[in-house]
């Protein structure tokens, strides 16, 4: 098996190195990752300028682009052998609830799925992660499970791992995305020249975080595994919208 690895924290990130070391024991791996931190890059592609890819000292391929760029390049021609699967992470921080809309890690996995491959995004739930070996262990466990009991080809899994020792994990739970409150206000400041600048504020606190959600699972010590779909259509509202639309032609 050939697995493509990427992330949004950059090619030198501890989480990516831990993931490569763990999965490299069970499969051939290729690592194509951003040359610097690209957190919250979402699904952006670089279209107005060329991308450059170089093999770094650690053997990983670094790209001066987004996580989506990295996976897109890797699958559509950068690698000599097309991978069978994509793993993104281990992200330095959670990707719970609304976070998936902004996450570069989830976007890397999403791009793999767009291009026809099963994909897994793995994140370690804390602001200062320490137990990367735990998340790597989870990645290996899920890899074995996918090999033994394959999920449908359109599978995209968003995995969040509590930042605890392996022995302290309570198990695995299949979850849905929770939801956060509105994001905190922007932080206003001034640059050295006195010009007004703004920092995006922190994400909102947990709102929809009850049983069954990814928030609830990780708070209880479980690995949260959420299946994501790429089709954003709200099918139940199509008939409502059809009735709402004007009947006369423009």
Image (spheres, rainbow, N blue to C red):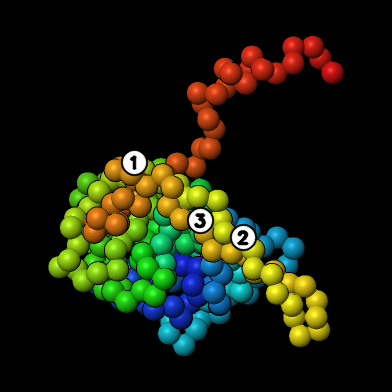
Report the quarter where the C terminus lies.
Answer: top right
Q: Determine which residue is flagged by label 2.
A: 185
The residue that disc 1 covers is 152
Neighbor class of circle 1 (other Cα within 10 Å; few <14, some 14-19, many 20+) is few
* Structural distance between the alpha carbons of marks 3 and 2: 9 Å
The 10 Å Cα crowd at callout 3, few under 14, some 14 to 19, many 20 or more, is some
Q: Residues within 10 Å of mark 2 (few under 14, many from 20)?
A: few
Q: Earlier in the sequence, mark 3 or mark 1?
A: 1
Residue that label 3 marks: 204
Answer with left or right where residue 47 lies relative to residue 63. right
Q: Is residue 209 left or right of residue 186?
A: left
Measured from the top left, where is residue 148 in percent x and y? 20, 50
Q: Residue at x 37, y 47 (%)?
A: 209
The reply, left or right, for residue 107 in relation to residue 243 is left
Q: Is residue 154 above or below residue 47?
A: above
Asked if 229 appears above or below 46 in the picture, the reply is: above
Task: Look at 36% across and 43% down and name the residue there.
Answer: 176
Proximity of marks 3 and 1: CB atoms separated by less than 8 Å: no
């Amino acid at each position: 098996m050939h697995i493509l690895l990427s992330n949004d924290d950059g090619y030198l990130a501890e989480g990516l190195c831990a993931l490569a070391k763990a999965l490299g024991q069970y499969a051939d791996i290729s690592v194509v990752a951003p040359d610097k931190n690209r957190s919250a890059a979402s699904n952006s592609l670089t279209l107005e300028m060329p991308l450059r890819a170089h093999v770094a000292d650690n053997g990983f391929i670094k790209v001066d682009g987004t996580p989506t760029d990295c996976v897109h390049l890797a699958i559509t021609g950068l690698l000599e052998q097309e991978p069978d699967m994509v793993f993104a992470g281990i992200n330095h921080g959670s990707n719970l609830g609304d976070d998936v809309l902004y996450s570069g890690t989830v976007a890397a996995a999403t791009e793999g799925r767009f291009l026809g491959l099963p994909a897994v995004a793995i994140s370690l739930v804390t602001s200062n992660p320490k137990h990367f070996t735990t998340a790597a262990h989870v990645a290996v466990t899920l890899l074995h499970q996918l090999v033994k009991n394959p999920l449908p080809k359109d599978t995209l899994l968003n995995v969040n791992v509590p930042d605890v020792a392996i022995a302290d994990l309570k198990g695995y739970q299949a979850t849905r995305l929770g939801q956060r409150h509105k994001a905190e206000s922007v932080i206003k400041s001034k640059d050295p020249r006195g010009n007004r600048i703004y920092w995006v504020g922190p994400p909102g606190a947990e709102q929809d975080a009850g049983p069954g959600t990814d928030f609830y699972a990780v708070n209880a010590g479980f690995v949260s595994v959420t299946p994501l779909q790429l089709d954003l259509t709200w099918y139940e509202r199509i008939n409502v919208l059809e009735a709402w639309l004007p009947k006369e032609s423009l």
